[in-house]
Image (cartoon, helix red, strand yellow):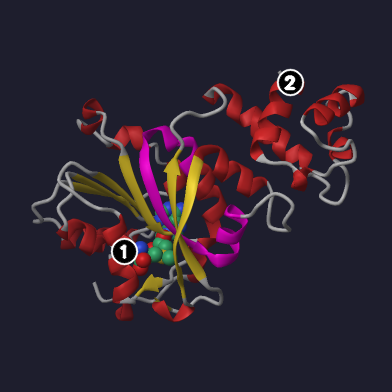
Amino acid sequence: MDYKRVTAQKRLGQNFLRDPAVIRRIVMALELSAADVVLEIGCGTGALTQHILAAKPGWFIGVELDRGLCEALSNRYSSASVSFSFLNKDILQVEIQEHIGDFEATGAKIKVVGNLPYYISSPIIDWLGRQSRLIEFATIMLQAEVADRVMASPGSKDFGVLTLLVNYYFSVTKLMDVRPGSFRPAPKVSSTVLLLRPKGTLALDSSEEAAFFQFVKRSFSQRRKTLWNCLKGDVVRADLEALLNRLGHPAEIRAEALALDDFICLYKELKR
Ligand code: SAM
């Protein structure tokens, strides 16, 4: 499909990749083989899809919310020799498990790829976290400012809930920066491709994750105030101070100065 002939829908975050070098690097990073199951988020006009299918993975799932684009892709590949399905769905409503068919029995994990629609990049990252136990890795394009938040260190202005959410589930590597001119239409912002690789063991049982992230959100509810001020009403002051002291932190510390391990320890000791 020729992206030049498609009118991009801004409300769906449609900025189609047109830079062959960027497309090649993203697809190469997938290291595709016939044993792979690949899920692409937002196939658009197929800039990445066509190269992924050409590499003949074992199973391909393309998710695209735009009905016209999704139908065009299904028609285009109807006689392809690769096993695939295109789902005209909101990615946030997709449960990977329901779409991997016989591959689930093989224990194969999914390679996720996507030049994400930026208007929902944070909810998609949240979705990836929840599906992380089924994922081998995810290669995703984000606006650079969001990627900076994902990779931020404690104490920096970008460090926050998103950083902790991603780093709870994944080890993060930056693959490359991408300039606006690599897309059509060109977005107003620069972009970055990140590789998210799920951590082998997670610190908490999946049943506790929602409560843990609620605790993290509460801790950042008033960024300029101390952790105690944010958690007042939820925890006993003396317990918090004793724990912070044990972790080597002052009682007046703010959430942005604490690392993921500190949050996990605080949650386990204070909230359970
Ligand atoms: N992969 C194509 C490319 O690189 O040229 C398109 C990328 S474009 C940035 C994002 C795509 O995600 C668009 O095609 C858009 O229609 C689609 N999209 C937007 N919201 C979506 C959602 N909630 N679920 C699935 N796809 C979505």
Q: Residue furthest top?
A: 272
Number of numbered discs visible in the structure rendering = 2
Residue 260 in percent (x, y) is at 65, 38
For badge 1, the amino acid type reads: Leu
**Where's the N terminus, which quadrant?**
bottom left
The nearer-to-camera label among 1 and 2 is 2
Q: Is residue 132 magenta?
A: yes
Q: Is residue 59 above or below residue 240?
A: below
Residue receiving disc 2: 269
Please state which of residues 266 and 68 is positioned toward the viewer in this rendering.
266
Residue receiving disc 1: 69
Q: Which residue appears at 44% of the width and 48% of the height?
A: 196
> Image quadrant of ligand 1?
bottom left
Magenta span covers which residues? 128-151
Asked if disc 1 is less than 8 Å from ligand 1, the answer is yes
Dot 1: few (<14), some (14–19), or many (≥20) neighbours within 10 Å?
some
Dot 2: few (<14), some (14–19), or many (≥20) neighbours within 10 Å?
few
- Residue 189 in sight: yes
